[in-house]
Amino acid sequence: MAIEVDLSGSVVLVTGGVRGVGAGISRVFLDAGAHVVTCARRPPQAPISGAAGTAEFLPCDVRDADAVRELIEAVVARHGRLDHVVNNAGGAPFAPTATASPNYHDKIVQLNLMAPLWVSREANNIMQQQRDGGSIVMISSVSGHRPSPASAAYGAAKAGLDSLVTSLAVEWAPKVRLNSVIVGMVRTESSHLHYGDEAGIAAVADTVPLRRLATPEDIGRCAAFLASPLAGYVTGGSLLVHGGGERPAFLDAATAGNVETAGH
């Protein structure tokens, strides 16, 4: 029997859903039959479409709690409900911690931790009143679970985001489920800014056990699963989506041929 994610008729908000990973998430939810509302500070350069049509866009700076409240009110006023939220908006440029400004660190934490909290809180207020409740998926990062040099505030914020999921899953149950997708390296239109030219991207991909970077749709399919009834008994969880992680450096440095089985 084929088991497919079917979100037909549901209303989904994807923050930062207009490019990169967010656009991939939006397309997957559209293909699953959902009506998708995206938000960002600037509109998409091209329409984001899927099987269920084209994503709707509403402008919002999710770091602004008042703007977030108005965003959620607008979604509910237009569609009468809000079934799922994917908190995808986030990120951080390379910036050595010792020299980056206090304002830089503050904005990184605002975007990657406080903004998902503001969106989730407003969404929860709606979902608690709905017969079937709702679900919230946080797009987190492996940076919150390993050293994150030159993006330390980002890594700390993502670690905080995963902690937030476990707490809110308890607070807001049984009506609202919360889970996080812990994302590894993804190939997007901005990959060259992080990994360099095609040779650099290929070299980075070769460090991943699955020998490739994720696609935005890889992340979208995992988010759609967590939002769907297929994950109806999953809350407070974290799904690792990193292609097997990173090969330990000692495996390449060691001279013993059986290093992978030695020690504990």
Image: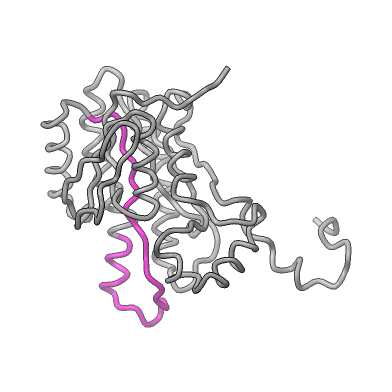
- When asked about the image quadrant of residue 100, the answer is bottom left
Q: Nearer the viewer, residue 168 or 231?
A: 231
Horizontal arrangement in the rendering, residue 58 relative to residue 195 (left or right): left
Which residues lie in the magenta part? 82-109
> Which residue shows up at 29% across the image and 51% down it?
18
Residue 84: in magenta span: yes
Q: Is residue 9 magenta?
A: no
Could you say which quadrant of the image residue 119 lies in?
top left
Residue at 21%, 32% in the rendered image: 125
Q: Image quadrant for the N terminus?
A: top right
Residue extending furthest toward the right? 257
- Looking at the picture, tell me which residue is in the foreground, 165 or 189: 189
> Residue 55 location in percent, x, y?
25, 40
Residue at point 21%, 39% (across, down): 122
Does 118 appear above or below 168? below
Q: Does residue 258 appear left or right of residue 125 in this picture? A: right
98, above or below 238, in the image? below
Residue 262 lies, with reference to residue 99, above or below; the image says above
Relative to 186, 62 lies left or right: left
Q: Position of residue 199 (x, y in %)?
A: 57, 72
User: Which image quarter is the C terminus in?
Assistant: bottom right
Judge whether 88 appears above or below 111 on screen. above
Q: Position of residue 219 (x, y in %)?
A: 46, 45
Q: Position of residue 207 (x, y in %)?
A: 64, 63
